[in-house]
Image: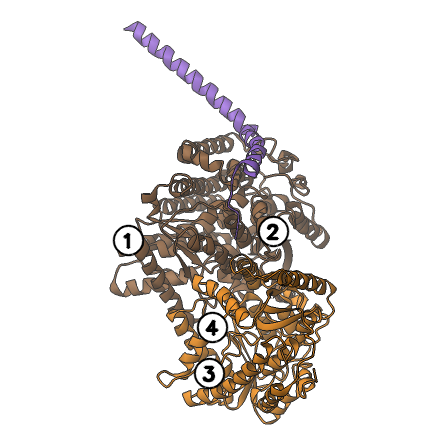
Amino acid sequence: MKDENRIGTQNLGSLYTNGRVRSRREWRGIVDTAYDFSRWLHNWITMFRVVLVKPRNIKAMFRYRWMASYLAVPMMIDRHTQGLRNEHLRICHEEQDLIVEDVAKLLDKLFRGDRRIGNDREFSSKVVLVDENEMQSVMMGFPTVVPLSREIASTYIPVLLNQRAALHYIDVAQEYGLAGDVCPMPEAEAGVSIDDDAPVLGCCAVQCNTTCDGSLMGNSVISKRLELEDGIPVFQLATPLRHREDDVQEYAAQEIRNAIAFIEEHTGEKWDWTHYFECAKRVNYATKCRLEWLEINRTDYPQVFGSNLALYTETNYMAISGRLKVFEDADRKITALAEKAFKKKRMAANEYRHRAIIWGVQSHYYMDFLVWLLNCWGIVPLTDMLSMVNTRMIAETDTPENREQAIYDIAWLTENMIMRNRTHGGYKVLLDELWEFVEEFNADMVILWEHMSCKALDGMHGMFEEKAREKGIHLVWVSHDLFDPRVISRQGVRDQINSYMRTVMNEEPVDPSLEILNDVESW
Amino acid sequence: MMTLIKKLLSFLLKLVLIAVAGTALLFVVYFFNLDMKLTAAMEPLLTWFYDNKVKRDQHL
Amino acid sequence: MKDLKYLAWFENLLQEANNELVAAAREQGKKCVSYICENSPEPLLNLDGCFSVRLRAPRTGSMEMATYYMTSFLCEYSRALLERAIEGGYNFSDCLIAPDGCSMINRCAENMELLHAMEKGKEHFFYEHMEIPMKADDNGLNLYVLQCKNHILTPLKENFGIDISDAAIRRAVAEHNRVCELIRAIGEFRKGDRPTITGYEYSVITMATYAAPKAMLIEKLEETLEELRTREPDAKNAFRVRVALVGSEIDDPDFIKLVEDTGAFVCVDRYCYGSFPGRDPIHLTDEEDALTQICRQYMVRGQCPRYMNTAKLLERRSYVDELAKEYAADGILYEQVKFCDPWAYDRMLGSHIMRNEYGYPVLSIDRPYAVSGIGQLRTRIQAFIESVEIKKIHGGSR
């Protein structure tokens, strides 16, 4: 399928240099370039307004190594908007610009309460530290409590911005004796803690065993310092692994009750059911919108897909969890744009050749790989594993029965945190359901991210191959090490696709200039 | 009265010219990626600072 | 020292997963309940009419098939088990109980299930995947009890007609405790300046109690205990230092032999498949049902690193310290099987804390599953022993 009316840059590879940044930004035609320019301005103003104008945040910039990665924020947006026009460009900006503002506020709050920086004790007394790898659903009933994640700020976002952001911390953890085969995400988070590079604030913390064994164990390194040295009490929220089984739901629910009691005890705030059900409505609205986008993606003209779907779902579903109205407004606008584009049968790239399900754990240092797939080879990433999350509507009306149900709903959402809802819970959710999605989305290809340190995923390698063979589906393995591009570089990731497309599919790239890129030094 | 209007118009014209020039300048920065080229040049300086000037209590 | 009369017999039981006692018990009509994680409460797997076997893969060579299915990034224990299962080495099993204790063991069990690796020709074969607690608290206890009921007791009853009553459980505990008491008593001979049992011998005997039907071992365990009471130690102590061995699963006594060949006496076996805490007797009262009491004790004493609350984290260190003091360990050897995520972190933390906060000399290593003849390991342990010895000579190892 081709778009003959496409305007703008054809050879996107020509924008790459051998250094950190691109030679220039993309020309997308007058209207879309003007739009992109206005959003660029908006984002810089946001960053100044929220973060850079405050001296304490500048102080933080010179204290925390990971802050250097935030120099690359506009470039991250450029990477994810590459090749986009019209509604797809606007959808991307709707999401990314909102995330930029949300993260800017996160940074500002972290430094406000940080004992080393702003040291606002009154503010800090209302802060609850939460894991990056944790559904913030347990905070839905605490309107005056401020949940903040140090890991999102110090590792998760920086690696999206700068492929080398986590390397120092991974090395620190390994210098202290941690084996190199563990997942680099908790490894880097542990490294931040060991390296004394995490803000210190909050009245308490809630850690969670999601995503995985590595995350559970990495938390022990962090809680040792947090609880035993910084004096911040920690509650470990244990979430069952066999989340599809009925006989674990009561355990999960009781953990939520215990977590709520812990937060109430340490913040002095009480759970607010009115606020909770307001958030629940937004969670349901987000679910409804996501299901609608996925429905559109099942057609020949998918609209919200690739990193537009993946990054936004991760943020909205996990980190926001209905707590902010502004994300509900964004959901509405994105849906309107998607419906408008669908009616016009818009395409997001010059050519669509393949329909793919992206499965497995994404290479975090190369999230814009999904955009590259589309632009270079015409492979449309219809959906990904991290976006195939909860589809169940939760109770949203305040009644005595629903208050009881709500605890189970929060537990259910926590169990179904992104990624772990597939990597744990048995082989059905990881292996069997993939093929159901392949059929539903009429996909002819599966791009399987093989995060080499993800034992839960690797452990099903052979079964994935056997099933793909049985069903006659092209299964393309793309190995990576999540946070560490030294193991497999971005070009190494691309080469796995390039080899398959040339040798097995006998195809030439849609945009040959993107096939080989020297971006080892790039952000 | 006419003088006042002329002065006002002159002022507004200058404002518009400044705004247009400013927008054009910003567009140049945007299109030629000068903001990222600048921040990329700042990165090594910051890294040097983190390596040499920040005291950390590194331990498990 | 004079050879223990039954050591060769115990060693022989460890040469094959389907050893002579497993075969004999099956011939008697008993059901073999295979399991792969220390978080499965053993007495529940040893009710009348069944016996438990903790799976191991002795004399593992290549793991190519398992590596294809699970990749080379998963721990070698899990791959060795899958390899052996694919080869048909566990066809003696009548069921598999697999707690979802860690991703690797879980995937191992799931691959066995998907490949139908163990149930050939068995009408009632079942696989059960259990949830187990991650914290030792009331909520965890409730979960544990429910999971044991749903995924151990009920399937045993429904598939094999096993009596799962409280009385039956208490009988199984009594037999389990008898074995534990014997193992503990045998282990006491590791104390003192001239121990009359080596760490290797002890590991063989202890391992046999995981790998073979317990009831059939009791007589020879009793005789071995009696033999030890009069066994004369060597005139000169062959060992230069005493070490506590701590960490992930070790089911190959050759690793203990390797350590002891370098001159270190393994006085404490705080690893998965060791006797601490796996061979602590279970104390039952009449005030509560046996199942709850068993689950509580397994949960409270569990040393698996997946227990993630801070209290458990601290307790794992203080436990090692208590054992090291009780058995007069000069140093600690922290080990993990390669590619084990939970122990990768716990080994890092444990090594640092025991060294810096408790003051023990610590050697921290990761090792392959099959360890015989690994030169590098031997060299590292030798160097560690020398450093501990020097510290002792200069007036105290801590």
Can see residue C53? yes
Quarter assignment of residue C179: bottom right
- Location of mark 4 (residue): C301
Q: Nearer the viewer, mark 1 or mark 4?
A: 4
Residue A439 percent coordinates (x, y): 55, 61
Q: Mark on residue A269?
A: 1
Q: Give the colour in which the image draws chain C.
A: orange
Quarter assignment of residue A47: top left
Badge 4 element: helix
Residue type at mark 2?
Answer: Glu
Residue type at mark 3?
Answer: Leu
Q: Nearer the viewer, mark 3 or mark 2?
A: 2
Q: Are marks 3 and 2 in contact (CB under 8 Å)?
A: no
Q: Nearer the viewer, mark 4 or mark 3?
A: 4
Q: Give the colour in which the image draws chain A.
A: brown
- Location of mark 2 (residue): A175
